[in-house]
Amino acid sequence: MFVQEEKIFAGKVLRLHICASDGAEWLEEATEDTSVEQLKERCLKHCAHGSLEDPKSVTHHKLIHAASERVLSDTRTISEENIQDQDVLLLIKKRAPSPLPKMADVSAEEKKKQEQKAPDRDAIAQATASLPPCNMDRAVVQTGMRDFQTELRKILLSLIEVAQKLLALSPGAVELFTKANAMLDEDEDERVDEAALRQLTEMGFPEGRAAKALRLNHMSVPQAMEWLIEHAEDPTIDTPLPGQASPGAAGAEAAPEAVAGPSDGDEEAGDELTEIFKKIRRKREFRADARAVVSLMEMGFDEKEVMDALKVSNNQQNAACEWLLGDRKPSPEELDQGIDPDSPLFRAILDNPVVQLGLTNPKTLLAFEDMLENPLNSTQWMNDPETGPVMLQISRIFQTLNRT
């Protein structure tokens, strides 16, 4: 009796439950050293899903171990896949791959991508080869588009001089400027942003503390909230700011001068106006944000450099840092220079009827002075019914001429 060699050296025979996708079930016997691909071929012969002469018939199916939900590898044996006796295997047809796009579709898609692609250096050089060479300094281009905030300061300085000359011609000039001086004597922080104050009070902070925090943090709600949290246990948190309780003193002291001025003759009135103008100018002295000073000095900059940067950037720390790291233009000295009186921009502003009418209003002069001292108050004056139209016209004229 002859015994086949494979029967002698065959491994342990396993009885496996096979389930096909059409619901058919049967038992399939296989030794441990049977490969998954061989087992799959025998299963396909049993359920006759296709002709085995077509190699795709085997590759289009897979065996899955039901208990572990693993897809069995065709190149490994049943033992290597840790298949045990009486395990359940699923014979599943693989999902057909999505059809490849047609050549026409591929060409159209590639053409669309090429159209949307930015030109490279060679393409730019080829397209501009016939143009005459032009060496233009980028710095000149950047400074050509002037920054409105920087130019606004120069415009305000020049408009203040014009407004002072116009108002000085009125009969009650001394009284008008005395009132303006008294209003500027009031602490800048007396005018609390009502919307910002409402936000903080709605969070539960007392109104007095919220107002103090806003004054100390230039009406910034996030910084004010941070200050309130940091100083919640500070016993002096409710102490009024220095000078806050005495805004009327300067006005009371100046009142006698206002009464006596007009009666002493034009010369004395002129001297008084000069003194008032000097007081107003002294109020423009820059006061740097203490927090920003500390932060920038910690980066290694000198105190004078930091003060100059904050002055140029209107106390905005990020802009000050950029100024320190850049070409440092404009310089602090340029901030105290007005705009060229012969420039088209200044002429266009003075020719505007709304601006002309506004310059005869003392409140406009007060707004200009306040914005020079506190640039963050610009929004407040833009929303004012008397000064807002003037500021809007200045902005429009600047933007129009800047584009041309």
Image (tube, rainbow, N blue to C red):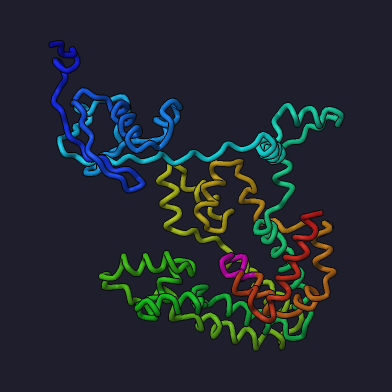
Q: Is residue 223 left or right of residue 398?
A: left
Can residue 214 be seen in the rendering of this structure? yes
Can residue 69 be seen in the rendering of this structure? no
Which range of residues does the magenta coloring cover? 369-378
Q: Nearer the viewer, residue 312 or 185?
A: 312
Q: Residue 93's x, y, as percent?
A: 39, 40
- Queried whether the magenta region covers residue 377, the answer comes back as yes
Q: Residue 315's x, y, as percent?
A: 52, 58
Q: Is residue 125 left or right of residue 305?
A: right
Q: Residue 110's x, y, as percent?
A: 67, 36
Q: Residue 298's x, y, as percent?
A: 40, 46
Q: Is residue 322 left or right of residue 242?
A: right
Can you tell which quarter of the image residue 55 is in? top left
Determine whether 128 is above or below 286 in the image. above
Q: Nearer the viewer, residue 248 or 7?
A: 7
Which residue is painted at 56% across and 58% down in the image?
314
Screen quadrant of the C terminus: bottom right
Which residue is painted at 54% across and 85% down in the image?
252
Which residue is painted at 45% across and 79% down in the image?
198
Q: Nearer the viewer, residue 162 or 17?
A: 17
- What secondary structure is the stretch in magenta mostly built from? helix
